[in-house]
Amino acid sequence: MMKIPSSATFLASAAVVLLCAGAARAGGAAPGGASAAPDKISGRPMVDVNGRFRIIGQTDTQSESTCIGRVDTPLCVAETAVAATERQDMQLQDIAYGKADPKTRKPFTSDIGSKVGYRIVSVRRFAPYDVPAERFNVFGIKAGDVAIYIETCNATYKRCTQPSLNSNISVLARKGKYGWYAVSGLGRPQDLTNPLYNSSQYWRK
C-alpha cells in the first residue's frame, strides 16, 4: 500500500499530467517546481496530500465535499460517484455517469445512516500518445480522459485513518453533454493513474 507523505508532487511531460501524493511515479517534476493546482470548484488541492480521509455522509450537509452533484470538474464527478454509491441514490448515480442533467437533481432522503471516508491518492490526465494501443485498451481510455485513484474506508462510527481492505477504486472521467462524467467508476480496483498501465502486460480487466 502506498504511503502518503506530507507534500504532493506535480509531474508533467508534454500533455501528460500526473498528480500523486506519493513517490514520483514517472520521474522528474514540472518545470519551475510547479505544485498541484486546486480544483476550481471546491478550491482544495486535487490530491489529499496530508493523508487525511474526508467524509461523505447521507446528505450534502453531512459531507465534506462541496461539489457533490456537480459535473464541473473530474474531482466533482468522482466525489459524486462515491456519494451516489454510499447513499444508494440512483438519481445522483445517473448524474455521475452522465445519464442525467445535474440541474434536474431533487432532494434525496436516505435512512442508511452510514458514512464513507475517502482520499484522493493520485490524478492523471491522458495525452493522445499516452492512450494504450487499441488491442490493449480494455478500459476504452481516450485522450483527455482523467483517471482519479481513491482510497476509501468505513467512517460510520469514527473518522478512519487507514483504507479498508480492497477498498481502492479508480474513476475514469471524460467530458460529455453536461460536463464531466464517469466512464467507469466504483468497483474498478486498478490504479489507472499508474504509468505502468502504458505497458500492455498490465492492461487487463
Image: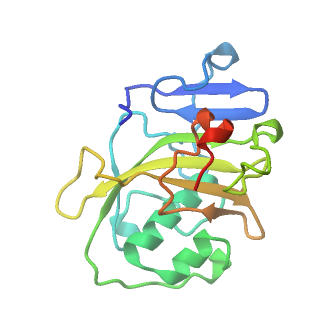
Q: Is residue 26 above or below residue 139?
A: above
Q: Is residue 9 above or below residue 59?
A: above
Please give left or right for residue 84 compared with residue 17 in the image. left
x then y, percent, for residue 90:
51, 82
Q: Quadrant of the N terminus?
A: top left
Kindly identify the residue that appears in the image at 32 percent across and 61 percent down: 116
**Residue 59 visible within the image:** no
The residue positioned farthest toward the right in the image shown: 128
x then y, percent, for residue 51:
35, 37
Kindly identify the residue that appears in the image at 52 percent across and 45 percent down: 191
Q: Is residue 78 above or below residue 133?
A: below
Q: Is residue 11 above or below residue 184?
A: above
Q: Quadrant of residue 179?
A: bottom right
Kindly identify the residue that appears in the image at 45 percent across and 64 percent down: 82
**Residue 135 visible within the image:** yes
Q: Quadrant of the C terminus?
A: bottom right
| Count of marks overlaid on the render | 0
x then y, percent, for residue 114:
27, 71
Please give left or right for residue 189 compared with residue 192 in the image. left
x then y, percent, for residue 56:
37, 62
Please give left or right for residue 200 compared with residue 189 in the image. right
Q: In the rendered view, how is the structure colored?
A: rainbow
The residue positioned farthest toward the left in the image shown: 157
